[in-house]
Amino acid sequence: MTQRRILVTAALPYANGHIHIGHLVEYIQTDIWVRYQKLAGNRCVFVCADDTHGTAIMLRARQEKRSETALIADMRQAHVDDFAGFGIEFDNYGSTHCDENRALCGEFWGAIRKAGLVSEREVEQLYDPVEKTFLADRFVKGKCPKCGTPDQYGDNCEKCFSTYNATDLIDPYSVFSGTKPELRPAMHWFIRTEDEHAFIEQWTQTGDHLHSDVANWLASAFLVDELHDWDVSRPAKYFGFEIPDAPGNYWYVWFDAPIGYIASTHQWCKANNEQLADWWQNPDVEIHHFIGKDITRFHTLFWPVMLKAAGYTLPTKVHIHGFLTVDGEKMSKSKGTFVRASTYLKHLDPQWLRYYYATKLTPKLDNLDLNLDEFAEKIDGDLVGKIVNLASRTARFVEQSGLSAKYPEDGGLFADTAAAGRELADAYQVCDFNRAMRTIMLLGDRANKFVADAEPWKLNKDPANAGRVQDICTVALNVFRQLVTYLAPVLPKLAAEAGALLNDPITSWEQSQQPLVGTKIAKFEHLMNRVDRKRITAMIEESREDLAAKPTTQAAPTAETPVAGTLPAGAAEAGAAPSQWSDGPEALAAEPLAAVCTIDDFTKVDLRVARIVAAEHVPEAKKLLRLTLSLGGEEKRNVFAGIKSAYKPEELVGRLIICVANLQPRQMKFGLSEGMVTAAGGGGPDGKEIFLLSPDSGAKPGQRVH
RNA sequence: GGCGGGGUAGCUCAGUUGGUUAGAGUACCGGAUUCAUAAUCCGGCUGUCACGGGUUCGAGUCCCGUCCCCGCUACCA
């Protein structure tokens, strides 16, 4: 076999947050692929680094009253520890804030300029005069220009979901200093990607660089039009690298981040006596990037242009995965499914997650669901019941004798399992880990059947059968070893332990093709535990309190609010203090209390009991129902309400509800809305969590709510 | 609204270029076994392959239409 040379990267985690189980999809996927390549005998180098630049880091460092470099150093160490805990093994783990990266950014910049791809022009942007820094959209807040909701970010309103420019905000203020930003012009530098349109088209649409779904998406979403200039500079203050020929300006974090792949490789080269050009400017080296679908554009439109201009090797393949959901829903801090890597490690075995993700990963971009029941079932059924069981049910019989000196007749079991290695190798190669895991488990079934049919525990009763018992166990343990070899990229710890058990370390895929005979067997020890469901619950509970605690404390500056007052800090603890109703703090945490309002403020809002006399779908609208409200007599209101996801029109007719009767009418696409109905709940991920308010029976339409 | 991907057993899914009686795991029921971590083995059960047309000797598979779900994207509150 010819040895391939493969350079692999996983996306650089941002130094602004901790690793969580969503991140781990990618790092586990990549690590499995890398371990497979190494096991298969290829020369494979896996590099990664912390992504450290940008305004968010600057902001956080300022909040924490320390330097950016101190912040990113701590976070990098936390990331390194988390990855190590999950057995993710980088050949080098660097940082984008390093000398190698600064030098490479300069080299790239020079080359891109030389290629004539850079242009500059003035851009007007909001500026914080106190902090002397320009403000990206997300660092400006103000009232939404559409609906007037206060404290909305500069790009969109989380209340009404409208999008706008930061300059449209009403009463804008800087999140840094709280002062009103002013509009200031500043020079920006752009890469004219349109100049490389033909190249990008060719690179994305031919060859096997991208999954066809991605190639098609790029073609229809971007390549049909002119490509926009890419703004790659930011004026001071900015935490990053200053652009040498544009003092006072810095490369945008997304310019230096991918170059960080190369910088990290460079560090590895220095430590291993290798030449960078041998890896990044050598057509014999394959370059594989693993990323999430959210950062596809940077890796498929901009990055190839940069590499081409600088004379570096273009990626062989960009592997793109989807997002993680937990029990079918987006990870949620309030539900406790936003689980940090370190929290997981406190409760559960990292190999379990590696295996579970492996059973779910395919070359496709589908989102991946972590179903916690299925998770436990798969570990118990597949790994403990099938794979490990093969060893635990036979090893004891040969503790004294070891494996037979000659591989016994086994009805073709070993040969068949060996033959499956080709298909499995192919599945690993194309990242179809799901197929690999299914195939391995079927092989495990066959091996368990072999043991059941051979019944060594019966034969063992007569010493005369010792040889036959040894042979049966030799077969079982050999197939176990084959399967563990096949699983080694996913379960490196199990592979190491199996190697120790059989006195023959698993280091190569090829070991699955030759039986092991005549070795001593170590005393059998538990290789893997079953999943304790209570630990899963504990992990979720811990994740829940972690994050719910923060907004609660922030939300209750006035300690007298009744809800906060009755909830001692950490009341959610393990669900241990269930009051009669066990109402958790999540809802309040999700939407903190608003500022104090006076009785006069309240009376401005005229709330009335109303009866829904008609309700119908608005076919063109996703969320809206058209309601006709009666306030009694002839007084009617036409109201559009965003409750379609939770209510059917027919179940609303006749109901009494509470409406805002004096709300300024608003012209909507579908007609005039003359008020609003009141409802609790934020809608939830599927929009089902909306609860209309109703008066107790006896209330009459038109009565005011006081 | 646009683009893309889907809809197969209660649940999770596999079904290669159209080809016998549509499969696996799990769940469930019955049996065997007691070596193994309540593990394992055998048997059984469950299907309008979303729906309606079409092509074909033959359609889960190909074509057209409809419905529903998911992702991206747009618009709207």
Image (spheres, rainbow, N blue to C red):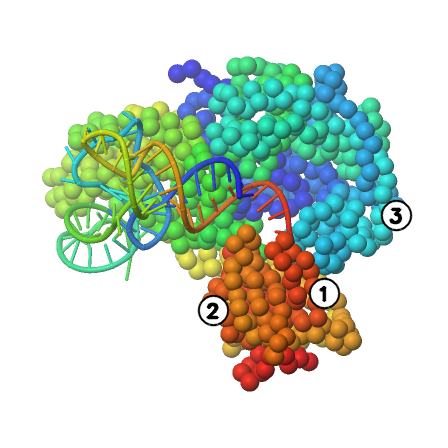
List the residue tagged with mark 3: A130
Labels 1 and 3 in the same subunit: yes
Please give the name of the residue rendered at 61% of the width and 66% of the height, measured from the top-left corner.
Answer: A638
Query: Sequence-wise, which precedes: disc 3 or disc 2?
Result: 3
List the residue tagged with mark 2: A651
Query: Sequence-wise, which precedes: disc 1 or disc 3?
Result: 3
Please give the name of the residue rendered at 50% of the width and 69% of the height, measured from the top-left corner.
Answer: A652
Residue B27: image location, x then y, percent: 29, 56
Residue closest to the eye, A675 or A122: A675
As drawn, the label of residue A231 is none
Residue closest to the eye, B11 or A608: A608
List the residue tagged with mark 1: A664
Residue A66: image location, x then y, percent: 78, 46
Please give the name of the residue rendered at 42% of the width and 42% of the height, measured from the top-left corner.
Answer: A360
A230 with respect to A362 (left or right) = right
Please give the name of the residue rendered at 42% of the width and 27% of the height, measured from the top-left corner.
Answer: A429
Q: Quadrant of residue A467?
A: top left
Labels 2 and 1 in the same subunit: yes
| Vertical position of residue A181 compared to residue A532: above or below | above
Look at the image and tell me whether residue A489 can be seen. Answer: no
